[in-house]
Amino acid sequence: MKKLLFISGSLRKDSYNTALLKEAEKILNESLNCSFLSYSEIPYMNQDIEFDEIPSIKRVRKEVEDSDAIWIGTPEYNHSYSGVLKNLMDWLSRPLVAGDYSTAVIRGKKVAISSVAGSSSGSFAREKLKEMLHLFSCTVCEKEIGISLGKRFSDATLILTEEEKRNLKMECQALLEMLD
């Protein structure tokens, strides 16, 4: 069974983006081996320690390398993705062998993107994230879902509308087709 690794761009315990990824997991769980990447303990990217054997970085890179695809749920902060997600991407995009960027574990991955954010539905963050992923030669799923919290912003739980559920199922189907 193919492996899908979910990456939430928010470390918040009750993250809306993590909640959306969990909804996708419910849909995909019978078709894919799904897991979530835990990366809160990784250090800031620093070329002085880039080739040190840092256990948290080694584990994170291995999980990404072993996956057939990743699905990123990104919040939107100041019209971009979060700093913690950027830091993770910086680590994943660095070569495992000095100077040989083809050894970067994210290079060439198949990626789905979604976002839960304010009035923009995370559109700015998704666009910037796609730009970065194309730089890494990733294949980005054409179908994506962006959810505007609107008045739901103060609620601690994410409750999807019927239309949002349909759109999420369509993104799940598009990802499965990418993996065929």
Image: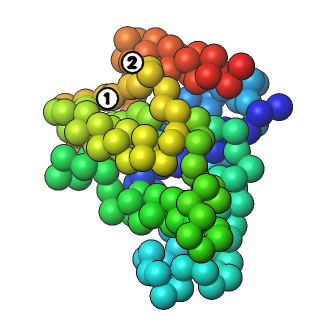
Q: Tell me the SS state at disc 2.
A: helix
Q: Position of residue 126 (x, y in %)?
A: 33, 38
Query: In the image as oriented, which residue stretches furthest toward the front?
Result: 99
Give the side of residue 54 with respect to residue 88, left or right: right
Q: Amino acid at mark 2?
A: Glu
- Indicate the quadrant where residue 58 lies: bottom right
Cα–Cα span, label 1 and label 2: 7 Å
Q: Amino acid at mark 1?
A: Ile
Q: Quarter of the image containing the N terminus?
A: top right
Q: Is residue 66 visible?
A: yes
The one nearer the camera, 44 or 16, is 44
Position above or below: 158 against 90: above
Write the residue at 51% across / 42% down. 137
Give the side of residue 20 with respect to residue 102, left or right: left
Q: Is residue 157 visible?
A: no
Q: Earlier in the sequence, mark 1 or mark 2?
A: 1
Q: Position of residue 144 (x, y in %)?
A: 41, 25
